[in-house]
Image: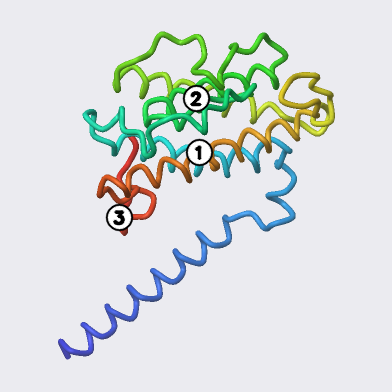
Amino acid sequence: MRNICKVSFIVAAVMAAGISLNAQEEKKPAAPEASKSETPGKAPTRFFAYEEYEFRSAAEAMPEEKWNYRPAAGMFKDEKPPYGPGEVRTFAEQVKHVACANFMFAAFLDGTKPPEACDKGGPSPAKTRAELLSYLRESFAGLTKSLGAITDKNMYDQVEEKPMPNNRLGVGILSIWHVGDHYGQIAIYLRENGIVPPASRPNPPELK
């Protein structure tokens, strides 16, 4: 009798769990319903969040004593390019460049004055690891907000700014690509110092 009661209890529990799961599944909006609230800014913002994790977590993973690491010392054959540095950036310079560029792209999208000379380091006085991480975090927050403000009514508005004339949607895509491009570079910096980028670890840590 006791065994029958136990079995009955288990069956009832499983059925209740199944009903609960079905109810939760029913609450999830179908694709057509979810698309009703979608905007041109939401999709790139979701992807940008992943790029933010990749880059910021990599920056946080590099020990302070390695922030001046430069994978290849010296100039690029004594060239002085009109845009960008004359030699490979240090890790700190990579972080500062991306942070400045994030603010620049946000300014393009918002129609405000962008920071100058981001390719050379930009105007921010941030130098220490703590200062640069704070600067980086603020830049991602600002650009995320600007990306989210892209709508079906303004996404084709022209942005007459360097590096090239574009519309708001195009600038948004370019800004995401830019972070991914530099993440690929600093990921190599980490591995050359025996550090696995957090985004490539089995259990990626949370951002600080």
Estimate the spatial distance between the alpha carbons at disc 2 and disc 1, rounded to whole Å: 9 Å
Name the residue: 73% across, 21% down: 162
Residue 21 at x, y percent in the picture = 46, 65
Quarter holding the C terminus?
top left
Residue 70 at x, y percent in the picture = 36, 34
Residue in front for this viewpoint, 116 or 173: 116
Residue 27 can be seen in this image: yes
Other-residue count near label 2 (Cα within 10 Å), few / some / many at <14 / 14–19 / ≥20 = many
Mark 3 highlights which residue? 203
Residue in front for this viewpoint, 77 or 19: 77
The tag earlier along the polypeptide, 2 or 1, is 2
Name the residue: 46% across, 68% down: 19
Residue 7 at x, y percent in the picture = 25, 85
The answer to whether the residues at label 2 and label 1 have Cβ atoms under 8 Å apart is yes
Mark 2 highlights which residue? 97
Q: Secondary structure at mark 2?
A: helix
Give the label, 2 or 3, closer to the camera: 2
The tag earlier along the polypeptide, 3 or 1, is 1
Residue 24 at x, y percent in the picture = 50, 59
Mark 1 highlights which residue? 182
Callout 2 amino acid:
His
Q: Determine which quarter of the picture holds residue 67.
A: top left
